[in-house]
Amino acid sequence: MTNMTRHGKNCTAGAVYTYHEKRKDTAASGYGTQSMRLGKDAIKDFDCCCLSLQPCQDPVITEDGYIYEKEAILQYILHHKTEIAKKMKAYEKQKQALKSEGQLESKSEERQRAEKFKQRENNIVSKPINPFTSDDGTPKSSASSFTSEASAGESSSSSSLPSFWIPSLTPEAKPTLLKKPSKTVLCPMSGRPLKMSDLISVHFTPLDPSLDRVALLTRQDRYVCAVTKDTLGNSVPCAVLRPSGAVVTMECVEKLIRKDMTDPVTGDKLKEKDIIPFQRGGTGFAGSGVDLKAKEARPVMQA
């Protein structure tokens, strides 16, 4: 067996541009999109609120599996309901203004039609009209007709070309029309409709029941599965049972609970919608997801 020569890390004699060399050159050049996997310090813990990013004292969970502090999510819902009420009030005010404006326009149109009708009635005469004589029978002068035509031309030009230096003749911008706001409050994470009645209380099982809340939060491993007593963490898939609010691991759900579909804490019968999986992987600067990578787009050098 012949001994193979060992290549150095900076070997440039290879015929293949390896992935390691490409990443090294990309980092050194400062060009190209870079991606890196987020560390543990950048990941929100599974028992932290999606709004405050702090450990929950009175946790609730939505039907989509996003956990919130009860006080924080209720303040969020009340704030958005107040904003929706303000937008609806402004929309109704605009609607009334447009309605009154339409009524005024209809009245002005009726008035214009009446004026035109009166003019047509007054123009109807029994004797023929001589265009070269006035009403009393005297001939019209050319100068008067010229002045009348000039004044008519001036009036038409003044009406078609307004002066922008006179405030009363400057054009006015119409206000932006408001759209009818939706009365539905959306979940800040999933974007789906959210109601107070849809929130489900969550009851964690502490690892050491003798510890108070402050001492419990300082520990890295705080809670365990309500059935198997396995330690819960970001890397352990969990689920909440709707009747009792107990937190169990997905392994416990698949191996024990799905056999008879009974809540082990309360003894209630479970449906498929009563098992709510936890959404994991949320961060403070990204929404959520299992692809925990950060990307930075930078310019690329092309040949």
Image (spheres, rainbow, N blue to C red):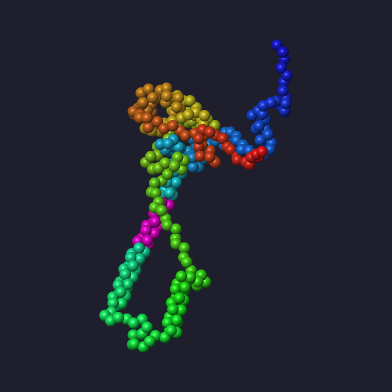
Residue drawn 61% across and 38% down?
33
- Residue placed most toward the observer, 263 or 185: 185
Q: Quadrant for residue 124, please give it.
A: bottom left
Q: List the single residue furthest toward the top.
A: 1
- Residue placed most toward the observer, 86 or 56: 86
- The x and y percentages for residue 72 are 46, 44
Q: Report the quarter where the N terminus lies.
A: top right
Rendered position, 91 above or below 214? below
- Residue placed most toward the observer, 112 or 297: 112
The answer, for residue 218, to whether it is visible in the render is no
Segment tinted magenta in the rendering = 83-100
Residue drawn 42% across and 22% down?
255
Residue 95 lies in magenta, yes or no?
A: yes
- The x and y percentages for residue 271 are 35, 30
Q: Report the quarter where the C terminus lies.
A: top right
Residue 49 lies in magenta, yes or no?
A: no
The answer, for residue 186, to whether it is visible in the render is yes
Residue drawn 50% across and 42% down?
52
Q: Quadrant for residue 25, please give it.
A: top right
Q: Quadrant for residue 126, please give it.
A: bottom left
- The x and y percentages for residue 236 are 50, 28
Residue drawn 67% across and 29% down?
17
- Residue placed most toward the observer, 137 or 300: 137
- The x and y percentages for residue 113 are 31, 69
Relative placement, left or right, of 218 versus 118 is right
Per the picture, the main secondary structure of the magenta-coloured stretch is: helix
Q: List the single residue furthest toward the left.
A: 126
Q: How many marks?
A: 0
